[in-house]
Amino acid sequence: MEKVVISNPVRTAIGGFGGILQDIPAVDLGVRVVNEILSRTGIDPKEVDDCILGNVLGAGLGQNPSRQVAVKSGLGTETPGITLNRVCGSGLQSIAFAAQAIKAGDSNAVLAGGIENMSQTPFYLTKARYGYRMAMPKDEIVDGMVHDGLWDIFNDYHMGVTAENLAEAYNLSKEVQDEFAYKSQMKTKAAQEAGKFNDEIVTVSVPQRRKDPLDFNVDEHPRGDVTPQSLAGMRPVFKMGGTVTAGNASGINDGAAAVLVSSESKAKELGLQPFASIVSYAVGAVDPSIMGIGPVPAITKALHKANLSLNDIDLFELNEAFAAQSLAVLSDLPIPEEKINVNGGAIALGHPIGASGTVILVKLLHEMRRRPSVKRGLAALCIGGGMGIAMIVEKIGGTSAASTGRRGRPKGSGVKAKPGPKPGAKKRGPGRPKKRGRGRPRKS
C-alpha cells in the first residue's frame, strides 16, 4: 500500500488564558495556519480534497468550524470541511482520519489539524430557554470551558482529580511532580533561546487599540523564571492534601496547528518535501477515573500494529496534561529521559485542548528533521473520558537549514486574523495568578 506522508507542519504560538489571543476566534487561528501551508507549498487549493480539524470547545463558534476555516482561508468554497471532537486527542485524530481517507482512496490530499480558543468559551444558562419564574438561581450558570473540556462526566469531577488518582496509585510525590514540571520549563526555555520553534510557528497579527497590530510568534505560556522553590510553594488545586498544583499541570490555552496529509505520489506530483510518513496510529481506552494512563494502551497498540518496540522509536512527544499523568505513563513504559519531550511539553507550552494533538506532532516532526540520526518518532496524548491516542511516524529525507519542508522561502499569506470586540493585548483578569493550571468549574 502506498505511503501516507505529512508535509509542512505548522502551528501558531500558544497564547495564555485570557492573554494575547483572547480576542482571536479559533476559526481565525485555523485560517492563519491553513493559509501558511498554502503559501509555503504554493499548491493550487483545488488539490486539497478535504479539511479535517479537531475542536473541543465549539460552543459559540457557529456551524462546523472546519468548514468555516476552509471557506475563509485560501481553500475556498469548493473545499469541504468536517470538525471532530476526541477531546485532547482531536488534533491527532484529525490526521489519522485524513490518513484513513487517503488509504481508502477517497482523498489524495487533506489539510488536517486542530483549533482552540479556550479563552473565548462561553458560560451557559442551562435553563434559560424556558424562562425563570423569578431571579435566576446562582447555580445555573455553567462554565462551558470546564463542563465540556475539563470535567469527567462519568465521575463528576475535574480532570485534575484523575491526576490525583494516578499520583496516589503510582505513589508520585509532589516533589517528583514538581521536578518533572521544572525540567519541562527549562527544556522549553532552552528551545526558545535556541530558536528551535521559529520555523514551526506562524505569525498571527493581533489588532491593538490605537496601535499597530502586534505580531505574535513567541509562545506566551512558558515561565522560564520558575524555580524549584516557587513550584514547591504552590498549593494543591483539586484535592485537600493533594499533590497536583497549577505549577505541575498544563495550562488553559489558545492556539492552532495544521499539516498537509497526502499520498506519497501526490506529494511528489505537487513538488512537496514531506517530513515523514505515517507508520501506524491507535486509540486505547481505560477507566475514566485514571484517564491519564490512556497513552499506555494506545502506544502499545500502535507499536504492535507497526511490529515495532519502544527501542525502535528515537523521539517521543507525550502531551503533559499533568506531571502525575506523564510520570504514571513513564512508569509503565520505560522510555529513556533523553528521548522524551526534548524541547519541553504542555506544562510549559500550554494545552489548547483541540489543537494539542497536532501541536505535539508538529514539534516532533521539526525536531526529527533537525537530528540526522533520528528515524522514527511517536506522539501520544491522554484523553478525557478514559482514552489515549498515539501515532508513529518515520522521517523522510535528512536535515535542512530551515527545517520547514518547503522549496524556497515562504511568502506571507497576507491574511490577518479578525479581531473580536476588544483589542488582543496581554491581559489578566482581576486576581488571576501568573501561572494558570486546569481550572475548577465556575458557578455563580
Image (spheres, rainbow, N blue to C red):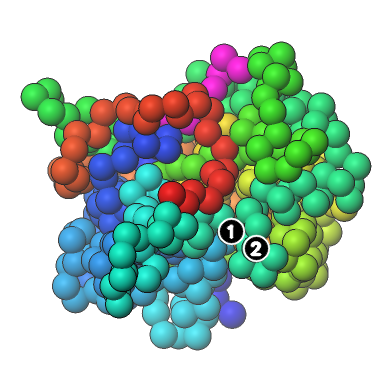
Residue at (76% x, 68% y) in the render: 286
The answer for how far apart the CA atoms under marks 2 and 1 are is 7 Å
Q: Which mark is residue 156?
A: 2
Q: Is residue 189 visible?
A: yes
Q: Is residue 277 visible?
A: no
Name the magenta segment's main secondary structure: loop
Amino acid, disc 1: Trp
User: Toward which corner of the image does residue 183 lie, by quadrant?
Assistant: top right
Amino acid, disc 2: Asp
As drawn, 163 above or below 432: below
**Residue located beneath label 1 in the image:** 151
User: Toward which corner of the image does residue 314 lie, by quadrant?
Assistant: top right
| Badge nearest the viewer, 2 or 1 | 2
As drawn, 4 above or below 348: below
Relative to 386, is 438 on the left or the right? left
Mark with earlier residue (2, 1): 1
The quadrant of the rendering that contains the N terminus is bottom right
Residue at (29% x, 62% y) in the render: 61
Q: How far from the left and from the top, in percent, is residue 406? A: 36, 47
Q: Residues within 10 Å of mark 1 (few under 14, many from 20)?
A: many
